[in-house]
Image (cartoon, helix red, strand yellow):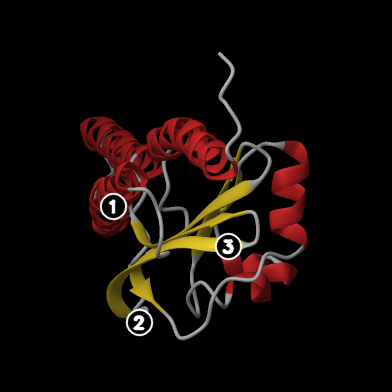
Amino acid sequence: MVTIGAFALGLVVINQASALDVEPALQRAGVLAGLLAVLLMLVGVLWTRVQPDSPARVALVGTEGLELSPGLPDSLARELAWGSRMLLTATPAATLQLIWGETTLLRRGLLGEGVLTPGPICARCLSTGKAISLVDLRLYPGRAEFTGLLPDLPAVVIQPLALKGLLVLGGWSPRCFSRSDLAWIEGWAQRLSDDLQQAEAQACGTPQTE
């Protein structure tokens, strides 16, 4: 639309410059046509800002898979399998990993050869109890922390689980996670935190208090 407006404005200028007799009617028509062309360019610019182009997907390299830690209670294993599948299908997540304490309970999606080792960014997420969204990982000096999740990830979300666990998701493209995606991730994390704490208490033989 911006290109069409600029082309139309150029035609108006050429038409005015090539006219042999500049009559009032021609001047009025040129002014109106020029205003319309400028208005068309302005609408095109505003439309581009309202609906920006979606970032292209990065060609991530990995093997599709699902890895669950052995020995999990059946109900918790089912919850992890269901929730991770929903995140991978309903959000732009390409891969995810769940860590509870020092144990990796779940890896799903595109899997790399390594395993995520939490570093300073993950530690800050746990200490504050708030999710961290890195919309374009290329801009962050600490991006090497997430190489174990999957190499060359363009975006990462780190969601804390009850100040003891982490749910880390890698996206297909920069700025791919919307507010609704983050809300869905947080909601499942809250539900999952209760299940993990309950399973841990049962494993230790500690009764749950309401």
Cα distance, mark 2 to mark 1?
A: 19 Å
Identity, as a three-letter code, of the amino acid under mark 3: Thr
Q: Which of labels 1 and 3 is toward the front?
A: 3
Comes first in the chain, label 3 or label 2? 2
Which comes before the other along the chain, label 2 or label 1?
Answer: 2
Whether 151 is drawn above or below 136: the answer is below
| The C terminus: image quadrant | top right
Q: Residue furthest top?
A: 210
Q: Which residue is mark 2?
A: 62
Q: In front here: 174 or 110?
A: 110
- Callout 1 crowding tier (Cα within 10 Å): few <14, some 14–19, many ≥20: some
Circle number at residue 181: none
Would residue 143 be found to the left or right of residue 203 on screen?
right
3D distance between C-alphas at marks 3 and 2: 22 Å
Judged left or right of residue 49, residue 126 is: right
Q: Which residue is mark 3?
A: 103
Dot 2 amino acid type: Gly
* SS assignment at label 1: helix
